[in-house]
Amino acid sequence: MDNILEPKPYKILIVKKLTAIEWLFRVEFDEIEKINYGQFIQISIPKIGEAPISITEFNAEEGWIEFLIRKVGLVTNVLFELKPGDEIFMRGPYGNGFPFDENYRNKNLIVVAGGSGCGPVRSMINAVNNNFESVKNMEVILGFKNEECILFEDDISSWEKKSNIITTVDEMCKDGNCSLGLSSGLVTEHFSKLDLSDLSNVEIVIVGPPKMMEFSAKEFVKMGVPEEQIWLSFERKMSCAVGKCGHCRVDETYVCLDGPVFNYTKGKYLID
Amino acid sequence: MSLKLTKKSFSNSFDKLKEIYTIYAPKRSPKQGRFCDTDIIKYDVINSSDEIVFNEKSNYAAKEVLSPITETLFYFTDNEYRAKKIAKKPILMFVRACDINAIKRFDDIYLKNGGFVDSFYAGIRENISFALMECPSKGWDTCFCASMKSNIVNDDEYIFGIQLGEEIKVDIKDPSLTEIFDGSQITYHVPVVEENLISVKIPMISNKDVQAKVKDLDLWKEYDKRCIKCGSCTIACSTCTCYTSYDMSYTPDSNAGERRRINASCHIDGYTDMAGGHSFRPSAGERLRFKTMHKIHDHAKRFGGEHMCVGCGRCSDHCPAFISFSTLVNKLSVEVDKLNEEDING
Ligand SMILES: Cc1cc2nc3c(=O)[nH]c(=O)nc-3n(C[C@H](O)[C@H](O)[C@H](O)COP(=O)(O)OP(=O)(O)OC[C@H]3O[C@@H](n4cnc5c(N)ncnc54)[C@H](O)[C@@H]3O)c2cc1C
Ligand code: SF4
Ligand code: SF4
Ligand code: FES
């Protein structure tokens, strides 16, 4: 019997600094066929600890996965000291991920992501961008605090070639003038620019800080989007990621097992 | 087959059992109690039949055998993980009906939840057999097992039942044990505690909207001042399974260290803390609500079986603020009845 808590060693391939405290790590991985968009991995450093981190991109042919990691504490501090060639330990993938085939295929997919919430949705947006026939249309709103916080600029410019991409910053742009292609204001202020003419065909994915997800979901419901067509990805404190430690539980739901992605009909009750 | 045994004969049987099993039972540690000059009764390995505390309820639950307060999971040497080795010798535990049912709740989480099996727990669990100890006819003053249906144990869930009072009686369920016990044949079966001194009415929450409204009840606010968020209730609880894992090095500059897990409590600060300083359920009342609902609603809803709470009453026994869990649940029942009615009447 496999020990579900035992992590395995994998080699770091690339470390890329996106902002001062958010770096991209590309790591070797061997169980890529198991991965679904929006799932996460337990990254572990012996003698330091473990932390759940979303898989932001994966490549089966080349055998790697990528993480967007924010430097906030014990494990992530040590990760920021590592370089290509060093080993980290991992177990997973965990969680359900986004139900792309079941629910989003051939639909108008709208993705709203705030800050590091771009991490969990990036692999799905990239996949759609590479195979645009898989959806009817895709539109994306990305919200960041300010211009310096913008993540994945290369990906964004490639998405812009095919989709309506709105990149907005909360703080007013410098001198009141945003750089080319940039908007300002909260993500919700841009919902009117989305194509919601066929409400029956739209599926909306929202990932970001709790308040941003709550206000965005409520706004879409106000605009007539059925609750069944809205999806959120939750973040909770986790220790085990396999339904044993209890930290991520809300009522009868374990976010690590039943989430992190929830349909809004269920997610709206997951308040505490 | 049931037998009446002399003290001497039981002591001999115990020694024979000891050859097969590592034996755990409630054991007295003098003067280690919560108040000065009080004893503590908790589960430990015992070597003689005299050590079994039969006439009192143990202060701590049987769970410690399966889920120690701190437990090493992995040893690190350089960059290698080595899982803890689990002893293969069978374990015999002297327990009450509620303890056996409590361990079934542990099984829900450690063996079933999400389809993931925790190897450390499973490794010990598969070695365990139970001896069912008879309780006083109504249990002890804080017990409410009859209300929680944890007063009942199936015959195949224990290898023998036992009364260890003035008289010693055993009811042998596992035929391979007949050679171990020597006494005169009688009729004996561990009686079920049909009724306790207190009874608890479990609230029936009719739907998700009512469940959401329970969170806003004024009832919880009363406990904001009373509960001191100490977590004693969850440590004493027969069914609290939560833990946090943490790593340590043997010395600051060594390559060797361990990953351990330590019992966690949803009553204590830090249980839900996330990066960026965000946490959930800051007030004592909200935490008490979270725990209560887990025990008498959420667990059963998830696993479709009995409630997590087995009515052992140890949370009430241990609370320094004298919060009685049974009283709380009965009060909640009254409020939930009102919410259900409001929900029907719109
Ligand atoms: C499903 C999921 C996906 C995630 N995906 C990502 C991702 O893609 N990228 C990413 O960067 N993060 C992600 N996270 C968040 C990440 O797991 C946490 O930030 C994690 O805590 C980082 O671990 P750490 O050991 O570095 O930080 P920790 O040392 O655990 O510290 C993190 C924070 O916890 C609090 N804290 C810790 N210890 C204490 C203490 N003793 N007292 C008070 N507060 C304390 C502090 O607020 C601190 O900032 C995800 C989380 C989940 C649940
Ligand atoms: S959530 Fe609270 S009540 Fe439930 S098992 Fe964990 S510590 Fe115990
Ligand atoms: S209910 Fe009592 S024992 Fe439990 S945390 Fe509150 S004060 Fe402590
Ligand atoms: S993270 Fe441990 S139960 Fe979900």
Image (cartoon, coloured by chain):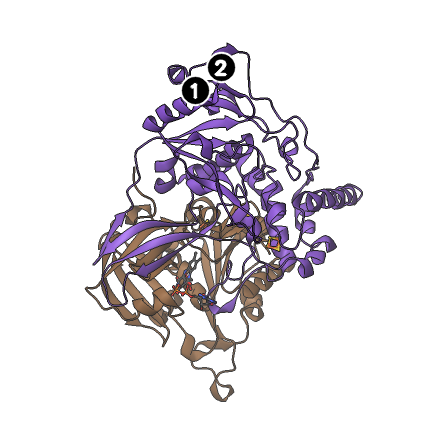
Chain for numbered disc 1: B
Taking the view exactly as shown, the residue that stands out farthest to the right is: B345
Residue B87 in sight: yes
Circle 1 Cα neighbour tier, 10 Å, few/some/many (<14 / 14–19 / ≥20): some
Chain letter, purple in picture: B
Taking the view exactly as shown, the residue that stands out farthest to the bottom is: A175
Position in image of residue A242 (x %, y %) = 41, 47
Q: Secondary structure at mark 2?
A: strand
Taking depth in this image into account, of B107 and A271 the one nearest to the observer is B107
User: Which quadrant holds the C terminus of chain B?
Assistant: top right
Q: Which residue is mark 2?
A: B3
Same chain shared by disc 2 and disc 1: yes
Tell me if label 2 and label 1 are in contact, CB under 8 Å. no
Quadrant in which residue B312 is drawn:
top right
Q: Secondary structure at mark 1?
A: helix
Q: Which residue is mark 1?
A: B9
Circle 2 Cα neighbour tier, 10 Å, few/some/many (<14 / 14–19 / ≥20): many
Label 1 near ligand 2 (CB < 8 Å): no
Q: Amino acid at mark 2?
A: Leu
Residue found 34% across the figure and 44% down from its top: A4
Q: Earlier in the sequence, mark 2 or mark 1?
A: 2
Quadrant in which residue B47 is drawn:
top left
Give the image quadrant in which the ligand numbered 3 is located.
Answer: bottom right
Residue found 37% across the figure and 25% down from its top: B17
Asked whether, in this view, residue A82 is left or right of residue B342, the answer is left
Asked whether, in this view, residue B173 is left or right of residue A55, the answer is right
Position in image of residue B265 (x %, y %) = 52, 53
- Chain A representation colour: brown
Residue found 20% across the figure and 59% down from its top: B78
Give the alpha-carbon distance from disc 2 to disc 1, as whole Å. Answer: 11 Å
Position in image of residue B156 (x %, y %) = 47, 21
Q: Amino acid at mark 1?
A: Ser
